[in-house]
Image (spheres, rainbow, N blue to C red):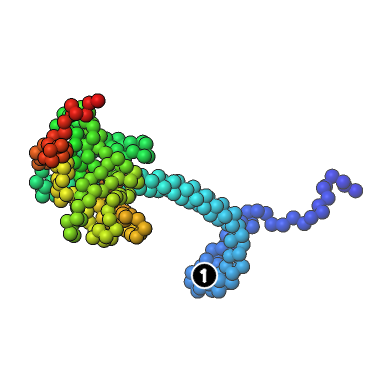
Amino acid sequence: MDNSQPVRFFKRGYSPSVQIAFFSLLSLALLFMDARYQYLGALRYVLSAFVQPVQRLVTMPSSVWQEASDFLYTQSSLTRESARLQQQHALDGSQLQQVRALVAENQQLRKLMDVQAHSSYPALFAEIVYAERDVFKRKVLVNKGTQANVQAGQVVVDAAGVVGQVTRVYPWLSEITLITDKDQSVPAQVLRNGLRTIVFGSGDISHLALRYMPVSADIQENDVLVTSGIDGIYPPGLPVARVSKIVRDPAYPFARIECEPLAGVDKQRFLMILSGAPVLPERPEAEVAGGDGHLGKRNKASMKP
């Protein structure tokens, strides 16, 4: 018995070259039949129904990765865009506030120029540069002083009315005491009937007071008070205040009358200093009755011991 021949457990098929030739001819035949007679269209349609889920399953990882990449890129892009827009919004808001401030200043200057055009007194524009830090003092400093011929006693107004009075002058600055200062008073009169009175500051930026007015005085709420021109300090006819509250108690001889200033004593930045007020004759000295019944000057020598 010859044992040199190997034992074959599996039956060997056709050679690879034969198989390639067979399947090539089969492919060509199928292509010819499909192109010529359209026999395989229905078969492709049926096979595509089975193949499509497999294609989706195979392409799912790449699709998921692409969608995740797009989502992450979009999210980071939106985050950067949101941060940029927030910065731009803050910048635009700051610029808008500056524009609004400039518009308000422009309107105020226009009103002051209109007041200057209709004023019969020379006027000088000034800008508030400092404010008194003491809450009990109503004073501000403006950027005009002796170099601009500002003098103590000159009246300061805005487009609405009297703001205060120059009380101290420096070379490049001037101190303005507001009419709401507790030590400030303005001779005034009621515009409706000409009743003379004096407006006193109360120390409160939004309140003025009329003191020593009889209960029977002809004064009403919403009456407008203007400067009377008495004493030659304030020019006549400048708006000062409006009566806001009147309390008449028969138990007291004087009424309690509160007013609110018409001028923006705590709001405006630009003011106008008036000059050239009329100079009144010097006030005569006080006189007393003499021993002989005639009026004469007080004899200072007789007052000595």
Question: How far across and how far down the image is residue 96, in percent?
Answer: 31, 48
Up-down: is 269 above or below 237? Answer: above
Q: Which of 236 and 37 is in front in this view?
A: 236
Question: In the image, what residue occupies the spot 83% across and 47% down?
Answer: 5
Question: How far across and how far down the image is residue 217, in percent?
Answer: 25, 58
Q: Left or right: 102 with respect to 250?
A: left
Q: Nearer the viewer, residue 243 or 54?
A: 243
Up-down: is 287 above or below 37? Answer: above
Residue bearing the label numbered 1: 34
Q: Nearer the viewer, residue 163 or 287?
A: 287
Quadrant where the C terminus sits is: top left
Q: Left or right: 205 with respect to 51?
A: left
Q: Left or right: 102 with respect to 54?
A: left
Question: In the image, what residue occupies the spot 46% across and 50% down?
Answer: 78
Question: How far across and how far down the image is residue 76, in percent?
Answer: 49, 47
Which of the 4 quarters of the picture holds residue 221? bottom left
* Kind of residue sitting beneath label 1: Asp
Question: How far across and how far down the image is residue 280, in percent?
Answer: 10, 40
Question: In the image, what residue occupies the spot 27% across and 60% down?
Answer: 216
Q: Can residue 279 be seen in this view?
A: no
Q: Left or right: 258 with respect to 231?
A: right
The residue most toward the front is: 292
The residue most toward the right is: 1
| Crowd class of label 1 (few under 14; some 14 to 19; many from 20; radius 10 Å) | few
